[in-house]
Image: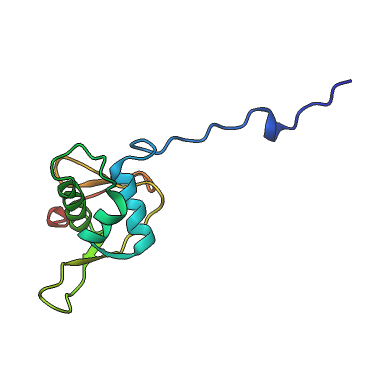
Amino acid sequence: MTPMPSPITRNPAPTPRPPGGANTQRRKIWNAMRIQGAFSLDDLAGAVLDGAETARHPENSIRNYLYTLAATGYLTKTKRRRKSEPPRWLLTRNTGPHAPIPRPNGDAWDPNEARLYLREDRHA
């Protein structure tokens, strides 16, 4: 008589695919933010960009993503110690491993919480 496989190993659930694919630039940026906690645009560019980007100015997509996350309450801009320093950001809403997805109107969909965060100027 053949032993019955355990219910745990018989039909393992498939691993859900992360929103936006496995290694999108947005996902890399989000992971770098979660690891670093506080960072500048240059910090993220150094951690994310590898030279294989096809865009003419790939740091612009990082900048746009930073502004969207700041407008929806994920990031806070810290005070500069010197005016010559680039702005630094602090991740204040770390909701989980999946990167928030910017919407065309400036809001952000959070797949970790299945929630839409509105731009702060739209709260009223």
Labels in figure, total: 0
**Quadrant housing residue 55:** top left
Q: Position of residue 17 (x, y in %)?
A: 43, 35
Q: Position of residue 16 (x, y in %)?
A: 47, 35
Residue at 13 percent of width and 41 percent of height: 56
Residue at 17 percent of width and 79 percent of height: 81
Residue furthest toward the bottom? 81
Q: Nearer the viewer, residue 25 or 10?
A: 25
Q: Position of residue 1 (x, y in %)?
A: 89, 20
Q: Nearer the viewer, residue 100 or 21?
A: 21
**Quadrant housing residue 38:** bottom left
Residue furthest toward the left? 83
85 versus 21 height, above or below: below
Residue furthest toward the front? 51
Q: For this view, does 15 lie left or right of residue 97?
A: right
Q: Position of residue 119 (x, y in %)?
A: 17, 53
Q: Nearer the viewer, residue 37 or 110?
A: 37
Residue furthest toward the right? 1
Quadrant of image for the C terminus: bottom left
Q: How is the image coloured?
A: rainbow
12 versus 114 height, above or below: above
Q: For this view, does 99 lie left or right of residue 103?
A: right
Q: For this view, does 70 lie left or right of residue 7?
A: left
**Quadrant housing residue 34:** bottom left
